[in-house]
Amino acid sequence: MSDFERGAAHLRGELLAHSYRMLGSWHEAEDAVQETYLRGWRAWDAFEQRSSVRTWLHRIATNVCLNVARDRGRRALPSGLGAPTGDGDGPPDVLPPQTWIEPFPGDRADLRLALVAAMQTLPPVQRAVFLLRDVLAFPAAEVAEIMDMSVGAVKSSLQRARTRLAEVDQGPDDVVEPRSPQARRLLDAYVTAFETADVEALMAVVRVDVTLELLPNRQWFAGVADCSPVFAMAVGRPGDWRMDRVIVNGQPGVTAHLYGQPYGIAVLDVRHDGIAGVTVFGDPALADGWVGVDR
């Protein structure tokens, strides 16, 4: 193992999560980390360790992500693109794959879908400063080094980012940890309702203000009155669905198979008083290979 590999290998998971928060895409984050390691390996002999390897690699990764973010529009969830619809029978308005936020495997609370979506509303530089300072806890002086900014500019950018995220208000205090008994109970109820086609049981565990997002469609639904007809159409007949429990973006979720074929992933926003939201990623490629919840 080379000196670079010894110094950099243990940072891959942290760099991958950082790149995902920056870009909102699992695939782009993977590519960004690969590019980061390639650049780091090429520059290792010139690296004089005036900073830590962690700081140095985060500087490379952040610059890679900034270049990607500047070259395209922001990724978002449907709820960030417009008002909810009440028409579940309308024609689909399909979003291109490069425009919507992708799910990320893992149980870290700072990867929750709503938080990642909120971060995408920030300009790329503010996003990077916020993540480096408030999520990764780099000192302001190191963030300034990573971003090639003055400490004063870092503090100003951070304050603007914090103000914007406070306006979005994506930090509810009633979120349930995904492995808690309450989360498991609600996840079990969700799975059983789909596998037995029991719409009433499903509606019994969702909140009155439940939201439903069905990617890649732009349309989304808010409130039990508008969501229930969509759920009723989706559950089908007993045995249509098979679901495996997983943790996605620090939230309870399922990988889903419909009629025996891969369908996608659903991520649940679980609160103490019920399921507050369901985000469905209708991509068959996502249905296999995720780490399950320990039973």
Image: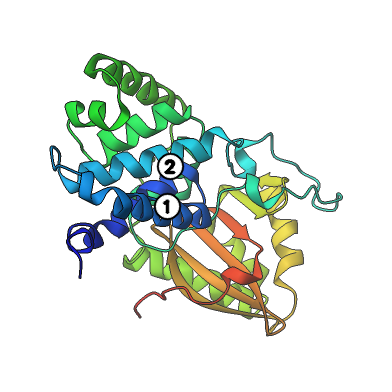
Q: Which residue is mark 1?
A: 35
Task: Answer left or right for 87 relative to 109.
Answer: right
In this view of the protein, which residue sits in the foreground, 192 or 154? 154
Residue 234's place in the image compared with 157, above or below, is below
Residue 120 percent across, percent down from the top left: 50, 36
Q: Does any portion of residue 96 appear in the rendered image?
A: yes
- 155 relative to 65 in the view: left or right: left
Which residue does the image show at 33% across and 68% down from the upper left? 181
Residue 26 to residue 153: above or below: below
Quadrant of residue 16 in the image?
A: bottom left
- Which residue occupies the foreground of this view, 104 or 53? 53
Who's the residue at 75% across and 74% down the image? 236
- Residue 266 percent coordinates (x, y): 56, 63
**What kind of residue is marked 1?**
Glu
Q: Where is residue 105, by image quadrant?
A: bottom left
Asked whether the residues under the numbered discs 2 and 1 touch, taking CB atoms below 8 Å apart as contact, a structural biologist would say yes
Q: Which residue is mark 2?
A: 64
Circle 2 crowding by C-alpha within 10 Å: few under 14, some 14–19, many from 20: some
206 left or right of 29? right
Q: Tell me which residue sits at (15%, 44%) in the image.
A: 52
* Residue 252 x %, y %: 44, 63
Applied colour scheme: rainbow
Q: Amino acid at mark 2?
A: Val
Q: Secondary structure at mark 2?
A: helix
- Which of marks 1 and 2 precedes in the sequence? 1
Using the rendered image of the protein, determine whether residue 175 is visible from the camera's viewpoint. Answer: no
